[in-house]
Amino acid sequence: MTVSRRETLAWVSATLASPWVASLAEPAFAQGDTGLWKEVDVAPVTASGYGSDPNLLKPSVPWPLTLTPDQRASLRIAADLMLPADSHSPSGSALQLDAFIDEWVSAPYPEQQRDRRLILSGLAWLDAESNARFNHGFAAASDGERRAIFDDIAFKGRVKEGYGRPAFFFARLRGLMLGGFFSGPEGMKDIGYIGNTPATTFAGPTNEAVAHLNAALARLDIKSA
């Protein structure tokens, strides 16, 4: 199944309300706390956005996607490590969270553009780190090798010395992945969320509720219906 641009735009719109994607304040990193990290040169996105009054029920496709196939492949790998399949939900790659991330970082808004530079720099770091450790890029690494890299940056209080900025990248990417996951039907089902679901039957208020309402209306000298 391929996710359409209209679907990913609607997905991004839904995710904006998720607490997982709230902006993280980037700390000041001490010299030597960045390891092989290098900030990549990112061309600014100059395409138009939604405009002042978008129709989110029928979203347009106002900006081009910008991630390369290799970057999308690395995101699919990361998605499966962060959100593996279980008895309740498919894996992150099966849900095509890489498409969601691509839509997010390609959007021409300040927050998304900050994330764009961070995510692209982080993906480049994953390849550099994997090459330094294992003599091949992240996509060519084994599952154990990928986990070894993530284990050094994934856990607060256990980040490897000198890996502060990569850990910040991991935290932001994980937040975006979770925001995308829990904004979709699979994630909502996973946590038992049943909002936006019409009730098939409604028996009406209980007798106790009606009595309480009538008493309150009587105190206000308002006749009940």
Image (tube, helix red, strand yellow):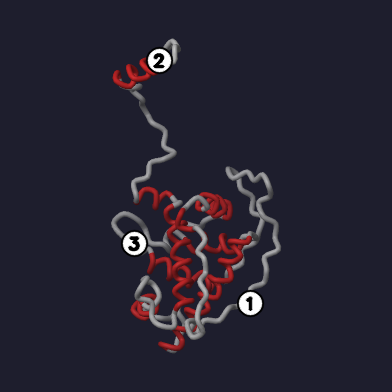
Report the residue at 48% width, 66% height from top: 172
Q: Secondary structure at mark 1?
A: loop
| Mark drawn on residue 219 | 2
How far is the residue under mark 2 from the one under mark 1? 69 Å
**Residue for badge 1:** 41
Q: Is residue 7 above or below residue 150?
A: above
Whether tag 1 and tag 3 are in contact, CB under 8 A, the answer is no
Q: Is residue 114 left or right of residue 213?
A: right
Image point (34%, 18%), residue name: 210
Mark in front: 2 vs 1: 2
How far is mark 1 from mark 3, CA to CA? 35 Å
Q: Which mark is residue 31?
A: none
Under tag 3, what secondary structure? loop
In the image, 44 versus 28, the foreground residue is 28
- Hey, which quadrant is residue 224 in on the image? top left
Return the residue at label 3: 85
Quadrant in the rendering for residue 77: bottom left
Q: Amino acid at mark 2?
A: Arg
- Please say if 103 is above or below 161: above
Sequence order check, earlier mark of 2 and 1: 1
Residue 211, image x and y in percent?
A: 32, 17
Amino acid type at circle 1 is: Asp
Residue 119 lies, in percent from the top left, at 53, 70
In percent of width and height, residue 94 lies at 42, 61
